[in-house]
Amino acid sequence: MIRAIIIDDESRARSALKQEITLNCPEVMIVGEADSVQSSVELIKKVVPELIFLDIQLSDGLGFHILEKVGNEDYQIIFTTAYSEYAIKAFKTNALDYLLKPIDSEELIAAVAKVSQKKTEEAYYQSSSAKCCRLEYRAAKENYFTYLRWIVCDTNCRYNSLQLIRELQFCIPKGWQQNFIG
C-alpha cells in the first residue's frame, strides 16, 4: 500500500483526484489532504507520506515552497496542475510525473505504476538478498549511445539471480569514450 496525500487549494479538484485514485489505483491509500503551503508542511511532517499529489498554484504560494520547507524527504511527487509552464522546474525537483488537469485516468495509472516500480526496486535493493552489485557499461560506437545498467545479484555474488535496478541511455560527445575508458 502506498501512503499518499493530496495537496490542492480547490476542494473540487481534491475530491475529483481522490475519486480517480479510489477507482483506478487500489494500491494507493489517501492518508490526508491539505489546501495551503502551511497546512501541507504540517501534514507532511505528521503523516510522512510515500507519495504526494501536488498542485502548483495554492492560495498562499506555490507547491514548490512546500518542497523547500520540508526538504527532499523520502517521498515521491506527482504534480497535478493546470499549468504546463512549470513542468521543467517540477522535474528539477525530482518529480516522478507531471499530470495536467483534468487528470486523465490512464496517465494517473501510469504515474502510480512508476511509484510502485520505484518502491519495489528500493525494497529489493535494501533486502538482505541484494548483497552484491555490478555496474555494466556498454557503448555503441556507431551512434555514441551509452547504456548503463545497475544490477543486483544474490548473496553469493554468482549473478545467477539478477535484478535490473536501473538502465540509463544517454548520448556522449565523439571522442569522450576514449578518454573515459582509456
Image (cartoon, rainbow, N blue to C red):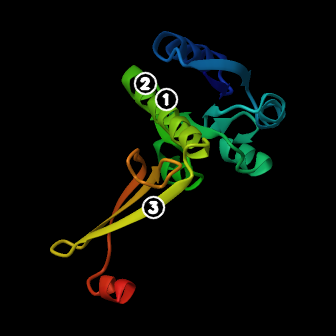
Three-letter residue code for mark 3 = Arg
Give the quadrant of residue 148.
bottom left
Report x, y in % for residue 53.
60, 31
As rendered, which of 135 and 108 lies closer to the eye?
135
CB-based contact (under 8 Å), mark 2 and mark 1? yes
Residue 103 rendering spot, x and y as whole percentages? 45, 24
Gap between marks 3 and 1 measured at Cα: 28 Å
Label 2 is placed on what type of residue?
Ile
| Image depth: mark 3 or mark 2 in front | 3
Q: Quadrant of the N terminus?
A: top right
Name the residue tied to disc 3: 134
On residue 164, the disc is none
Q: Position of residue 163 (x, y in %)?
A: 42, 45
Residue at image location 47% in from the left, 51% down from the top: 152
Secondary structure, mark 3, is strand
Residue shown at the point (82%, 35%) measured from the top left = 45
38 sits left or right of 64 in the view? right
In the picture of the structure, the residue carrying the numbered disc 2 is 109
In percent of the image, x 79 and y 48: which residue is there?
Answer: 69
Please state which amino acid type lies under the numbered disc 1.
Answer: Val
> On screen, 175 above or below 6?
below
Query: In the shown orientation, is residue 30 left or right of residue 181?
Result: right
Q: Which residue is mark 1?
A: 112
